Amino acid sequence: METLVEIHDVRKVYKRDQFEIPVLNGITLGVPRGDFLALMGPSGSGKTTLLNLIAGIDRPTSGRILVDGQEVSSYSETALASWRARHVGFIFQMYNLIPVLNAAENVELPLLLTKLNRKQRKQHVENALAIVGLADRMTHYPRQLSGGQEQRVAIARAIVTDPTILVADEPTGDLDAKNADETLDLLQRLNAEFEKTIVMVTHDPKAAGRAKHALHLDKGVLAEGQYGYEAEPAVVRT
Amino acid sequence: MRFLHLIRGNLFRNKVRSLLTVCLMAAIFFFVTTLLSILATFDNASEASGVDRLAVQSAISLTTMLPYSHEQKIREVPGVAETAKLQWIGAYYKDSRNFFANFAVDADKMKAVWTDYAIDPAQFEAFKADRQGCLVGPELLKRFDWKVGQKIVLKGTIFPFDPQLTIRGVYYHPVNVSSLYFHTEYFREAGLGGQGLTGTVWVRVSDTRKMAAVSQQIDEMFKNSEYPTETFTEKEFQKNFISMMGNIKLLFTSVSVCAIFMVILLAAITMSMSARERVTEIAVLKALGYRPGLVLGLMLVEFVLLTLFGGLAGTLAAKGFYQVFDMARATSGFLAGFRVYWQTVALCLGASALVGIVAGGYPAYRAANLSVVDGLRKVV
Amino acid sequence: MAIPLKYNIGNISSRRVSTLMSVLGIGIVIAVMLSMMALSNGVNSAIISTGSKDNLMIMRDGSDTELDSWVDKAKFQVLRTLPGIQKDAQGQPVISPEIIIVFKLPKKDNPKGSNVNVRGVTPMGFEMRPYLKVIEGRMFRPGVNEVIVSRRIRDRFVGCNVGDSFHFGPQDWNVVGIFDGAGTSFDSEIWTDVGYLGSVRKRESYSTVVIRPADHDAATSIKAAVDNDNRLKLQAKSEYQYYDEQTSGLVGIKVLVGFVTFFMVIGATLGAMNTMFTAVASRTRELATLRALGFKRRAILMTVVIESAFVSLLGGLAGVLLALPVNLISTGTTNFKTFSEVAFNFNMGPAVALRGILLAVVAGVIGGLLPAISAARLPITRALREI
């Protein structure tokens, strides 16, 4: 199957004051289209950084990242922003809904950057909210929703633009078991039914178990044995 | 505007804070509107003055008078259409705090010189016919609750003479709304113009293009006489009067600027607070693909709307307030033509918007350019 | 139990930038207010301080100002012989006939000129105003076209330095000296010999006559004698009262000062409120912790109010510092009662400065109250959860 995300020898070093902290030490990886990949690892292993790089909200110190054939690691800040708007859907641990906007308005946020008119946007918002099962909560504000509902609104916001890839950072980290389950069901459904490629960071083995594949990071490198290939880009075999 | 929800939501995010900023803006802009309106009133007084009139006064000093014979000679100057004597009386009504302008004027020539004054013909005839009649401005009528036909007595100050007058009519003029005019003849008979002296002679020229020439010719004519003259256009005359108060323009402008600067500082505090609170949300928007420029723009629009709304409230409140509140009375007639002009309102709105941009610019810029990763990390 | 002040000082210094901005903001409004007060104070003291309660001014009955008063020379002779007038060392009555004429002279910033009072006096006029000192050049000689000019007029008008001469009316006037009137309205005048001034300006009568009564009773009897003599048609009032009345021609300034003060206090109050709301919002959790530790609501309320008052106090002090330079401004306005120039210095004395600081603190307390109440009302649990 075709590789959607190609990561070539990516390194990331953070500078804090005069100290240099290496976070990713040469990652090479390929994620096929339609995959549901879990990135696991202890705190500080670099999994969130890797996710941020794939999502284009951070840039590698060296190495190349290609998503759908486009080398996003070479994009300028503004080009990257437009690229994200078109190709990436975000799901966060804390949901990160805008508290002053209701569910529909939150979901509409990414659509405001498109050329869609008001009616089309409304249609898309309704569809997205229907998919996550919250069609009846359109006018509710985040504080009027439960954590699980908030996360589902956030997922609706992530899929409303029909992005190329969904990135989720600990999507169940702040949820109880039942809501976490429902959220994972939803992600699985998006992957299976809508063929969304999903990359999810989690430290929860149960959540990782719902993904098609799981990769372990430790101290900025992929753990030996699983999908780490030396010579050519690691491709997750399906 | 597709981002309306977002902006509206943020405006009402912290209601107390927004309300406070609006209140502060409103209070300061009420204040600034008042000061600027006073300046505009002065400016307008000189702008609305007759374009075809000259005032001839003594070159020696404001209190030195001119002989009646000067008027005769001035009439002979080519380009002079009509002349009239005008004498400042400086009397007051009942209480010396009731300051208003009152003059003795050549009644029969009044209309011919002050062509821009509207007077009911019947009332004007009645005024001319009554030696002790007078014409008053509409504001004055309102202020002292006078009626046409009423007899009034003024108390003289400069001259030992208490004019006993009957109000015969009302004159209308866009700016001069609270003066009183009575007959030169009455003033003279009281023994005061007895020596044949008058404070000023007013001239209407037949061709406004020749004003400077006429003015110069008059001054030349009397240069070596015992009573040298100085001739001003009406506009200059008004401006001189205002400049006598000192540098009001500088004072008011600097006070206004200081007040606005203060609001900028305080608004900047709230706005940076507001921006700091929203760091994560802004990071989310940016992750969703909102470019820094757009985020900056959205925040600036929000801040500007906030200050604009405060400014609008303050300046319109001032406009409404001074429609009810009688500034002329409060200042003993000093600011008789006081009004909040729409130009002043517009100026204040411009300034309010500027407050939003200046105060919010830096916080918004910083927030908009914070890296997405740093912004998101704040919560995780 | 009260929360120690050290806590407030810690807070203020930890929010250095925003505290500095608040202090500056409040400082500016207080400075504006103080400047206006200094202006009003300056004008008032320029006029009122002129009047001595010891001197009686005799003017035409019905006139409000020296300029429209006249006292015949014959009447002056009558006044001179009134009983109760103090005698000087030579046994002469202390009485000063004076003529006040307005000269229009070119100003440095206005070549068209402005009106200046020129006062003709006898040596007795100086004796009655002992604070008036010639600080440069010499005294004018009687009977010639020599004048002495006040320092402030010299600074603001053209050709008024010692050795200069200016043209007014048919003659030239030679400036032979500069005097200092100790902040009185004489600081806006030019003085010369009364006899010479009267003769060249064709004045048959004096403008006013100033009398120094021997004592308080004499003052009362002289006043009564003048006021009640119907032949004289004159009035007597103390010099102080006369100058006090003159300030009514400056009512505009008083109204303006009141107006500015009102709005600036509102501005400072809202400013303090604004500052404290942000300060409280940024440490909700901290205040809740204090509550959890057992501090009473009242203690929270007090600590916020105290902090607000303290920030405003700093603002007030900043305002005084910002406003100090206005004391260097020397300018002029016109007394519309006399149409003549009043030269004055902005005068922010300690009393005015203190009033400014006090108003700042009051504004701080009032402004701090609302945020304090909202801080004291925060439920501990919710506040602890908030970020």
Image (tube, coloured by chain):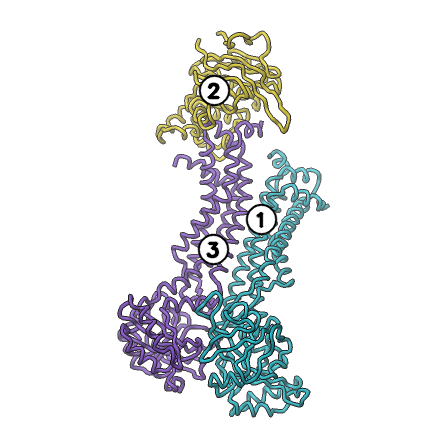
Q: Is residue A35 above or below residue B251?
A: above
Q: Is residue B355 above or below residue C186?
A: above
Q: Is residue A170 in view from this perspective?
A: no
- Image-quadrant location for residue A176: top right
Amino acid type of the residue that numbered disc 3 sits on in the rendered structure: Phe
How many numbered marks are there? Answer: 3
**Residues marked 1 and 2, same chain:** no
- Residue at point 45% right, 58% down? B36
Disc 1 on helix, strand or loop? Answer: helix
Binning the other alpha carbons within 10 Å of mark 1 as few (below 14), some (14 to 19) or many (20 upward) gives many
Disc 2 on helix, strand or loop? Answer: strand
Q: Nearer the viewer, mark 3 or mark 1?
A: 3
- Colour chain B is painted in: purple
Q: Position of residue A231 (x, y in %)?
A: 53, 7
Q: Is residue B78 above or below residue C56?
A: above
- Colour chain C is painted in: cyan
- Given the image, what chain letter belongs to the residue carrying mark 2? A
Amino acid type of the residue that numbered disc 1 sits on in the rendered structure: Met
Binning the other alpha carbons within 10 Å of mark 3 as few (below 14), some (14 to 19) or many (20 upward) gives many
Badge number at residue B30: 3
- Name the quadrant of the C terminus of chain C: top right
Badge number at residue C273: 1
Q: Position of residue B279 (x, y in %)?
A: 54, 33
The alpha-carbon separation of the residues under discs 3 and 1 comes to 19 Å
Q: Position of residue C76 (x, y in %)?
A: 55, 89
- Residue at point 57% right, 76% down? C176
Amino acid type of the residue that numbered disc 2 sits on in the rendered structure: Leu
Which sits in the foreground, B211 or B174?
B211
- Given the image, what chain letter belongs to the residue carrying mark 3? B
The alpha-carbon separation of the residues under discs 3 and 2 comes to 53 Å
Disc 3 on helix, strand or loop? Answer: helix
**Residues marked 3 and 1, same chain:** no
